[in-house]
């Protein structure tokens, strides 16, 4: 395994510092179904936000067209992130 770089260590420390112990306690008591519902809620919120932004940028789009554009943008972003991971 490759050792972590100083930058990666700094990023991990920053991420850990942001963890709220109260949230950890709440999540410990959640069932798998509750976790799944919470994640679905977060994903759905992000999807609606992307569609809303598309409709503001291009008010002539229908809801369906805005959803398609938002998904295309998301998949393009995901592909760029996966490509970066493959290059490491």
Image (spheres, helix red, strand yellow):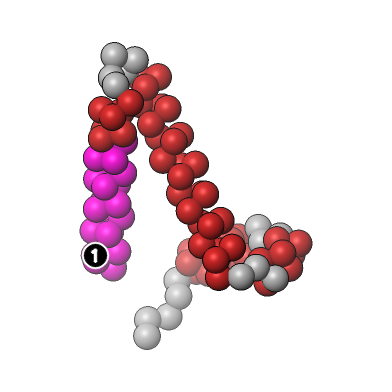
Q: Residue furthest top?
A: 60
70 versus 8 height, above or below: above
**Residue at left offset 49%, top offset 41%:** 45
Q: Name the residue rendered at 24%, 65% in the picture.
A: 87
Is residue 50 something that shows in the picture?
Answer: yes
Is any part of residue 73 visible from this angle?
A: no
Q: Quadrant of the N terminus?
A: bottom left
Give the image quarter of residue 19.
bottom right
Viewer-nearest residue: 28 or 1: 28
Please tell me whether residue 61 is drawn above or below residue 64 in the rendered image: above
| Image quadrant in which the C terminus is located | bottom left
Q: Position of residue 11 (x, y in %)?
A: 53, 62
Instruction: Name the residue carrying label 1.
Output: 87
Q: Residues within 10 Å of mark 1 (few under 14, many from 20)?
A: few
Magenta stretch encompasses residue 21: no
In this rendering, position of residue 29 left or right of residue 11 = right
Is most of the magenta stretch helix, strand or loop? helix
Q: Is residue 87 magenta?
A: yes
User: Start and end of the magenta stretch?
Assistant: 70-88
Residue under the image location 26 percent in, 47 percent down = 75
Q: How many numbered marks does the figure carry? A: 1
Q: Is residue 40 above or below residue 29?
A: above
> How far across and down, in percent of the image, does residue 39 sit?
51, 56
Horizontal placement of 25 versus 65: left or right? right
The residue lying toward the viewer, choosing from 88 and 57, is 57
In this orientation, which residue lies closer to the viewer: 12 or 47? 47
- Residue extending farthest to the right is 22
Residue located 40% across and 34% down the image = 50
Q: Position of residue 28 (x, y in %)?
A: 68, 72
Disc 1, SS: helix
Residue 22, quarter of picture: bottom right
């Amino acid at each position: 395994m490759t050792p972590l770089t100083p930058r990666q260590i700094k990023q991990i420390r920053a991420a850990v510092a942001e963890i709220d112990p109260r949230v950890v306690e709440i999540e410990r008591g959640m069932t798998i179904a509750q976790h799944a519902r919470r994640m679905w809620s977060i994903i759905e919120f992000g999807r609606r936000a992307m569609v809303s932004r598309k409709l503001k940028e291009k008010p002539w789009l229908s809801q369906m067209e805005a959803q398609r554009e938002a998904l295309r943008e998301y998949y393009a972003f995901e592909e760029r992130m996966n490509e970066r991971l493959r290059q490491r």
